[in-house]
Amino acid sequence: MISTVPKSVKLWGRGQLTIPKEIRQALKLDEENQLSVFTVGRCLVLTPKRLLGPALAKDVEKAMKAKGLSLDDLLRDLKAERRRYNREHYGL
């Protein structure tokens, strides 16, 4: 099982980072794997490249259910994050 306790990593070189060993082992990642990288609000999300589309949606849905979150909760938080971001970066 993958821990939900946040791990701290440091960027180095040209934006490189090291994924902690226990996470790599839990996800069965090795140096040959490619990851997809995208952002959600101010969050950086890394997924194994094979985890796309419906599989990713199913995993997100399970995580939301486990945390008691609804789609409305996420959309409300996303709107608040956009307002905060626009205020900080553009004075809007």
Image (cartoon, grey):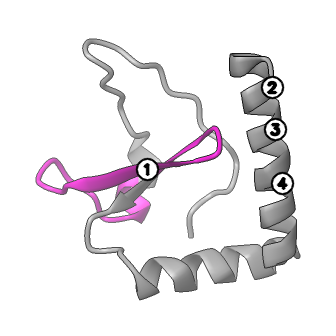
Give the residue type at disc 2.
Leu
Q: Please tell me the numbered disc located at residue 77.
A: 4
- Furthest residue in direction top, as rendered: 13
Q: Give the mark toward the camera: 3 or 1.
A: 3
Element marked by disc 1: strand
Question: For mark 1, what is the residue?
Answer: 38
Element marked by disc 4: helix
Q: Nearer the viewer, residue 76 or 44?
A: 76
- Left or right side of 26 for 57: right
Residue 3 at what x, y percent from top left? 63, 57
Residues at badges 4 and 3 in contact (C-beta under 8 Å)? no
Give the residue type at disc 3.
Arg
Residues at badges 4 and 1 in contact (C-beta under 8 Å)? no
Residue 65 at what x, y percent from top left? 78, 82
Q: Quadrant of the C terminus?
A: top right
Of callouts 1 and 2, which one flags the residue occurring earlier in the amino acid sequence? 1
Of callouts 3 and 2, which one flags the residue occurring earlier in the amino acid sequence? 3
Of callouts 3 and 1, which one flags the residue occurring earlier in the amino acid sequence? 1
Q: Is residue 2 above or below residue 11?
A: below
- Left or right side of 73 for 52: left
Question: For mark 2, what is the residue?
Answer: 92
At a point 26% along the width and 12% down the height, the residue shown is 13
Q: Which residues are magenta?
A: 24-45
Q: Nearer the viewer, residue 87 or 32?
A: 87
Question: For mark 3, what is the residue?
Answer: 83
Q: Is-magenta flag for residue 36? A: yes
